[in-house]
Amino acid sequence: MTDPAPPGAAAPAEAEVEFQRGLACDTGAGQPRAPAAAARWYHAAATRGHAVAALPLGLLHDAGDGVA
């Protein structure tokens, strides 16, 4: 019997997907630009440990773009 995966084992892959969704919302790739949705996706990715997601999230906060 194998050991079960530790909690959060899939987090890096999920974090990358969340970051990419945030990037699409932020840039408007294939859809209207949605900074509030981008901030939510970036935050989710950063919470999972995606360090790169913290930068665009910070930039959105600094600009007050899509965040309240």
Image: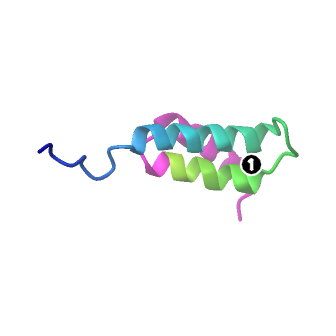
Q: In the image, residue 49 lies at what x, y percent? A: 41, 43
How far across and how far down the image is residue 35, in percent? Answer: 76, 51
Q: How is the protein colored in the picture?
A: rainbow
| Residue at point 43%, 48% (across, down) | 48
Of 26 and 65, nearer the camera is 26
Residue 18 figure quarter: top right
Relative to the observer, which residue lies in front, 6 or 51? 6
* Drawn side of residue 23 relative to residue 10, left or right: right
Q: Looking at the image, which residue sits at the far bottom?
A: 68
Tell me the magenta residue range.
46-68
Q: Quadrant of the N terminus?
A: top left
Residue bearing the label numbered 1: 63
The overriding secondary structure of the stretch rendered in magenta is: helix
Which of these two is toward me, 4 or 1? 1
Q: How many marks?
A: 1
Q: Amino acid at mark 1?
A: Ala
Q: Secondary structure at mark 1?
A: helix
* Quarter holding residue 36: bottom right
Image spot of residue 68 (x, y percent): 71, 65
Looking at the image, is 34 positioned above or below residue 13? below
Residue, x 49% and y 46% (percent of image)? 46
